[in-house]
Image (spheres, helix red, strand yellow):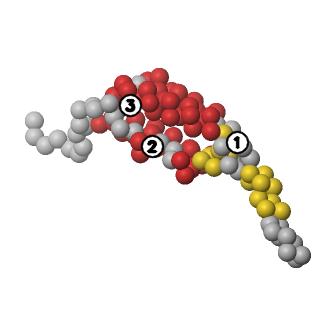
């Protein structure tokens, strides 16, 4: 589990600082989730990037002309995801790790102890 936690932190830290990142980052992220699911038996499907999050980015647009020619959009063959969307998923898993780790500790007493 510690390895998965640190791999997630590293993935987050090393994501390219661009609007979109390639599908390989999602593949790495899902691979880490697969490992955690296998080790813990937990269902982490809510944290996975969905198929609808992945897309072929636009590389060029040709507007329709006034002579009746139709507009056209060219898309890349590459598959990408918005960086912010992937970061949202990674942050959610890291938060889940921290929550589950802290909730396995004995409850901490809050407030004042009366008596004794």
Front in this rendered view, residue 43 or 69: 69
At 40% across and 35% down in the image, what residue appears?
97
At 72% across and 44% down in the image, what residue appears?
77
Q: Position of residue 110 (x, y in %)?
A: 24, 43
Q: Earlier in the sequence, mark 3 or mark 1?
A: 3
At 71% across and 50% down in the image, what residue appears?
57
Relative to 62, say whether 83 is above or below.
Answer: above
Mark 3 lies on a secondary structure that is helix
> Alpha-carbon distance for marks 2 and 3?
11 Å
Can the viewer see residue 9 in this picture? Answer: no
Mark 1 lies on a secondary structure that is loop
Res 93 → quadrant? top left
Q: Residues within 10 Å of mark 1 (few under 14, many from 20)?
A: few
Which residue bears the numbered disc 1? 78
Which residue bears the numbered disc 2? 47
Q: Residue furthest front?
A: 68
Which residue bears the numbered disc 3? 37
Task: Between label 1 and label 2, give the one nearer the viewer.
Answer: 1
């Amino acid at each position: 589990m510690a390895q998965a936690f640190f791999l997630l932190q590293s993935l987050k830290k090393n994501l390219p600082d661009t609007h979109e990142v390639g599908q390989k980052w999602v593949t790495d992220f899902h691979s880490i989730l697969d490992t955690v699911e296998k080790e813990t038996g937990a269902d982490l499907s809510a944290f996975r990037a969905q198929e609808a999050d992945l897309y072929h980015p636009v590389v060029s647009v040709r507007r329709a002309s006034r002579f009746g020619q139709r507009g056209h959009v060219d898309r890349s063959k590459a598959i990408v995801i918005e960086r912010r969307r992937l970061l949202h998923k990674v942050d959610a898993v890291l938060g889940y790790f921290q929550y589950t780790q802290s909730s396995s500790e004995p409850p901490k007493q809050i407030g004042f102890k009366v008596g004794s």
